[in-house]
Image (spheres, rainbow, N blue to C red):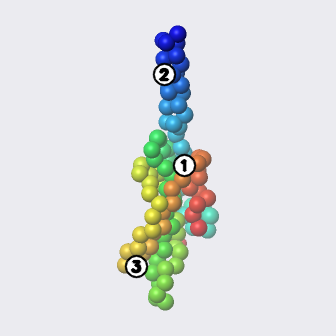
Amino acid sequence: MGKLLLLLLLLGAFVLLLIQAQERICMSCHMFVNGKCVESEGKCTMEDGGACRTRDIYLFNARGGFLYNHTMLECSKSCKASEESYFHLKISTFCCKSQDFCNKYKGK
Ligand SMILES: *[C@@H]1O[C@H](CO)[C@@H](O)[C@H](O)[C@H]1NC(C)=O
């Protein structure tokens, strides 16, 4: 009886592992503008632990504000949501793994 229980537990753990190690297909695009990819459209596969990444690129303009310019879509092994500002550039990063191509809908 004890052995059977152990076997069941192992089986359960194995099934859980299989579910977790699911692959996710992300959209990749070097330049995504107005809902369309205008440069290097493709897809990439992300394994366990990674996520699809969306990065909105803003450029500093003469009037002193950041203006949205384009979006980049890609796979990331360690995606972290963030907002980084450089001198003339701002990058907003989003991550998702809820469904295949989920990063396609996150960009502006
Ligand atoms: C801004 O977006 C345009 C496409 O709309 C692109 O051609 C240009 O290279 C982008 N500028 C920068 C600095 O990434």
Say which residue label 3 marks: 88
- For marks 3 and 1, the one nearer the N-term is 3
Instruction: Please name the amino acid that badge 3 sits on.
Output: His
- Cα separation, mark 3 vs mark 1, equals 30 Å
Q: Quadrant of the C terminus?
A: bottom right
- Cα separation, mark 3 vs mark 2, equals 54 Å
Percent across and percent down for residue 40 are 50, 57
Say which residue label 2 marks: 10
- The answer to whether residue 30 shows anywhere in this view is no
- Cα separation, mark 1 vs mark 2, equals 27 Å
Whether residue 79 is situated above or below residue 92 in the rendered picture: above
Instruction: Please name the amino acid that badge 1 sits on.
Output: Lys
- For marks 1 and 2, the one nearer the N-term is 2
Label 3 SS: loop
Report if the CB atoms under discs 1 and 2 are less than 8 Å apart. no
Percent across and percent down for residue 64 are 46, 87
**Which is in the foreground here, disc 3 or disc 2?**
2
In front here: 20 or 2?
Answer: 2
Residue at screen point 45% across, 44% down:
49
**Which is in the foreground here, disc 3 or disc 1?**
1
Whether residue 12 is situated above or below residue 30 in the rendered picture: above
In front here: 19 or 63?
Answer: 19
**Which is in the foreground here, disc 1 or disc 2?**
2
Say which residue label 1 marks: 97
Of all residues, the one furthest to the bottom in this rendering is 63
- The answer to whether residue 62 shows anywhere in this view is yes
Label 1 SS: loop
Of all residues, the one furthest to the left in this rendering is 87
Label count reads: 3
Residue at screen point 52% across, 40% down:
23
